Image: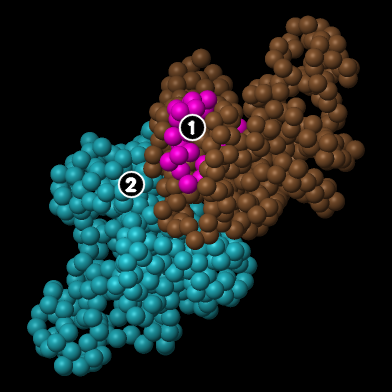
Chain colours: A brown, B cyan
Amino acid sequence: MEKRLMDKNFNYSSLKLGIIGGGQLGKIMSQKAKKMGFHVTILDPTFNCPAAQVSDKHIMGGFYDKEKLEQLVQESDVTTFELEHVDTSILKELYDNGHNIHPSPYVMELIQNKYEQKKLLDEKGIPVPAYKDVKSEEDLCAFGFPVVQKAKLGGYDGQGVQVLKSLEDVKTKALKTDSFIEEMVDIDKELAIIVARNIEGEIKCYPVVEMLFDERVNICDSVMAPARISKEVEEEAIRVSTESIKALDGVGIFGVELFLTKTGQIQVNEIAPRPHNSGHYTVEACATSQFEQIIRAVTNLPLGSTKLISPAVMVNLLGEEGYEGEPFIDGIHDALEIPELSFHFYGKSFTKPFRKMGHITVLDDDINVALEKANKAKNILKIKGSKKV
Amino acid sequence: MEKRLMDKNFNYSSLKLGIIGGGQLGKIMSQKAKKMGFHVTILDPTFNCPAAQVSDKHIMGGFYDKEKLEQLVQESDVTTFELEHVDTSILKELYDNGHNIHPSPYVMELIQNKYEQKKLLDEKGIPVPAYKDVKSEEDLCAFGFPVVQKAKLGGYDGQGVQVLKSLEDVKTKALKTDSFIEEMVDIDKELAIIVARNIEGEIKCYPVVEMLFDERVNICDSVMAPARISKEVEEEAIRVSTESIKALDGVGIFGVELFLTKTGQIQVNEIAPRPHNSGHYTVEACATSQFEQIIRAVTNLPLGSTKLISPAVMVNLLGEEGYEGEPFIDGIHDALEIPELSFHFYGKSFTKPFRKMGHITVLDDDINVALEKANKAKNILKIKGSKKV
């Protein structure tokens, strides 16, 4: 039974989509799938998770629960992902038996391992920072200091990344898990591109954006679309991202994080095989959002236009330091006075410091004005909690 | 207990919204409320209605079921509407006891009666077509022929409207219900404006759009935003619509349907006290959609910008003549190849001729190109059914 290429005579009015993961990415994906009239089932361990609130069905189960993963795939015409940390063994078995799972569990498995991911890109001639497998304490020192140590598996939002500044750090702060080191790149800007690839191999890139980080915790703070870069840098970023996704051979949406070095070179930092924080702005600013695009890609529908309709700045709303518990949105009235501002709140029942609780996207014909408006909103909006910590 | 002005210190992260009606309008409203993190309960008699599929809770009950209406209002911090045909007696009682219901049931009651609506507008000096209450067969003939007869209550989508062309028609085709007549206006274009008004009385207008009708059934077929009209006509349309909503004193979103006569005059046809088919385009084309705007208005949040980000054409996808039963979306692959096209399908389990099953919105910098693209899609997309009728 070869089901992987969904038949074009399929009745889309009864299409059943499965999404592994029920956070904010799954929530917006589900809303876009529901916009197109599809039936959506979410797999997530958390009762009343954001995506479950807007979907038809919720299978409560963890991402390493083989039985629940199999149930989801069996009940769905197509299964996709909002996260990459998931058991791939049962998914590979189901995929090999002809079930529609995109990106394929083989691609997911490869990307899960940041070292293998980097090695593949490197072997395909795609520029990446110098890196080296770590087998001993000696390996950690091979590039001198400072150096970036990264866990091969399980990292996200600044977790699983450690900067080592000295031999002392190697002794006291080094990650104890399976890891590799990466040269400390002299970064001018961090850029990102959302790339869509459909089942027939068609690729579409979204605009190159600029990611700004909250340095306290290394979490993406805001995103500017388009990035303030030259035409040459833009073209190189698009070329490198396109080649990377071709190398991976995946179907869906990929968030390609890039470094623009001080010497003007583009390097791939890492790739997320799913909608990405740097693509939130596409909901308001592009003809087709990344969340609708992944649905189109995995259901064998034509990819939508990635045209930027308006410049935009997106700002993450992180849980305020010093608070946890039931969230309270401080400043919502003043923030929503700002024109062309779209407010997203994910519906998580519990806030904690730096947790991603929502985001805003601000449009303006002038990207610098959009940035001013977004920064104003960022200073007003505070996600506090019912408890001081 | 005066709750009608929601306290600005209210914790919006736990806001519970109730929506009366679970069709496509309720569905998109709910999706926008969920975007902002609110809890949404739908009241609708139909199992698995479009809005219930994307909301937290579904109370199965009819719009004249006082017990269920009361349950919805009691469980919600704010209650609003996606339709106007609803029992207002229990709602007035609850409103008088301090519950947040917007637009108020008094406004809903007034608008339900098209004759009273017209009379109020007329008395406030707003231009409307000549009209006359019908108490006898003689009254039906008072304006000569042809003349438009309208039921005072319960009309929608061409229902409850009858054109009488002769005395013969008066005998054989006249509506038997409580009605009034209206002069047959010599129409150049049918225009519409979505108007938002918040609790503090602030009013914002969306762009003036042009409505095109399917003449077979008098249902809106497509909408062009902006309308192809002169600056003077645009200003008069905005003035008349703003005055109309001031006259009604309602809070929420109002779809104002206008006639542009062949002599260049603007007249109000009728007003819907809820998101309106002519405002679907705002989802993709405006900074704040009409569906998010009503949520902002009724929850005492600032109104969002109504700026047109891109010209747009919306086309309704009506159930194809000759089919009923489980819908089949014919032509979806070819239609979705058209760039800057957004596909909405409501998730109704049953199609029948001319039933509103979905819509598309097409963006383009050039409104005429948008219209071409939309017409191409319209010719490709056919909502067929499992059964020939």
- In the drawing, does residue B37 fall left or right of residue A89? left
Does A71 appear in magenta?
Answer: yes
**Residue at coordinates 84% horizontally, 15% vertically from top-left?**
A139
Amino acid tagged 2? Ala
**Residue at coordinates 51% horizontally, 20% vertically from top-left?**
A323
**The disc label shown at residue B52, or none:** 2
The residue range painted magenta reads A61-84
Query: Tag 2, which secondary structure?
Result: helix
Q: Nearer the viewer, residue B163 or B91?
A: B163
**The disc label shown at residue A69, or none:** 1
Q: Nearer the viewer, residue A275 or A259?
A: A275
The span from disc 2 to disc 1 (Cα, nearest Å) is 26 Å
Whether residue B34 is situated above or below residue A171 in the rendered picture: below
**Residue at coordinates 75% horizontally, 6% vertically from top-left?**
A172
Does B381 appear in magenta?
Answer: no
Q: Where does residue A277 sit, x and y in percent of width and height?
A: 62, 38
Q: Where does residue B192 sit, x and y in percent of width and height?
A: 41, 70
Q: Nearer the viewer, residue B85 or B308?
A: B85
Q: Does residue B251 appear in this view? A: no
Amino acid tagged 1? Leu
Q: Where does residue A318 sit, x and y in percent of width and height?
A: 57, 30
Q: Where does residue A375 sit, x and y in percent of width and height?
A: 63, 39
